[in-house]
């Protein structure tokens, strides 16, 4: 499936060389995509793993892994395609695993082996449904339906996303790293 997920404009403020507030960058962020998960896209807009200090120069702090460390944050826009989008029949599984780890470091360690999308992370996910609709599947198989304008606080429990509609769903997500008990 061709990636038809649009880039998102990201404007970042910070202090200029004279210590004055300024627009440090104004550009487009392309979605990260992978052949193994066609139609999915992750726009990683801002991230950190160490508590930032403000004001600052507007340079994005480091946060290399897909999911943040405790106290870290990932601010993303996540696109989930309809469940009818097929995985390519000729997908090279080893190449797909390599691509996923390269583009989304550490993500695979949180995904369950049976490829149902179920996963558990040590994060609190603050989610806003910006477009479309989606269902959140929980441990017991129960699905909670969310539509445009709904919000969700996902507190590190086992879950998966299911898009039973005919259109992609866009979620605005802030992922906060937490300690697992």
Image (tube, rainbow, N blue to C red):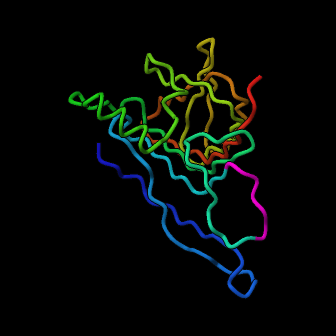
Residue 80 lies in the magenta stretch = no
- Reply above or below: 48 against 17: above
SS majority, magenta:
loop
For image coordinates 41% across by 38% down, the residue present is 100
Answer left or right for 167 relative to 69: left
52 magenta-colored: yes
153 vs 16: above or below? above
Side of 165 relative to 2 (left or right): right
* Residues drawn in magenta: 49-55
Q: Residue at x 43, y 38 (%)?
A: 101
Picture quarter containing residue 135?
top right
Location of the C terminus by quadrant is: top right
Q: Quadrant of residue 142?
A: top right
Taking depth in this image into account, of 84 and 99 the one nearest to the observer is 99
For this orientation, the residue located farthest to the left is 90
x then y, percent, for residue 144: 64, 25
Q: Is residue 46 left or right of residue 165?
A: right
Query: What percent of the width, then of the height, locates residue 47?
Result: 63, 53
């Amino acid at each position: 499936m061709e990636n038809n997920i649009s880039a998102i404009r990201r404007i970042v403020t910070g202090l200029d060389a004279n210590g004055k507030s300024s627009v440090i960058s104004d550009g487009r962020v392309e979605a990260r995509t992978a052949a193994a998960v066609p139609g999915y896209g992750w726009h990683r807009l801002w991230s950190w793993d160490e508590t930032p200090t403000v004001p600052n120069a507007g340079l994005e702090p480091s946060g290399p892994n897909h999911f943040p460390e405790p106290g870290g944050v990932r601010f993303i826009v996540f696109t989930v395609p309809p469940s009818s989008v097929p995985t390519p029949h000729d997908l090279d599984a080893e190449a797909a695993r390599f691509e996923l780890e390269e583009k989304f470091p550490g993500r695979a360690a949180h995904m369950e082996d049976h490829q149902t999308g179920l996963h558990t992370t040590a994060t609190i996910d603050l989610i806003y449904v910006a477009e479309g609709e989606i269902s959140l599947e929980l441990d017991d198989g129960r699905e909670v339906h969310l539509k445009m304008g709904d919000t969700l606080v996902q507190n590190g429990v086992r879950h998966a996303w299911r898009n039973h509609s005919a259109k992609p769903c866009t979620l605005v997500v802030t992922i906060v790293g937490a300690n697992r008990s």
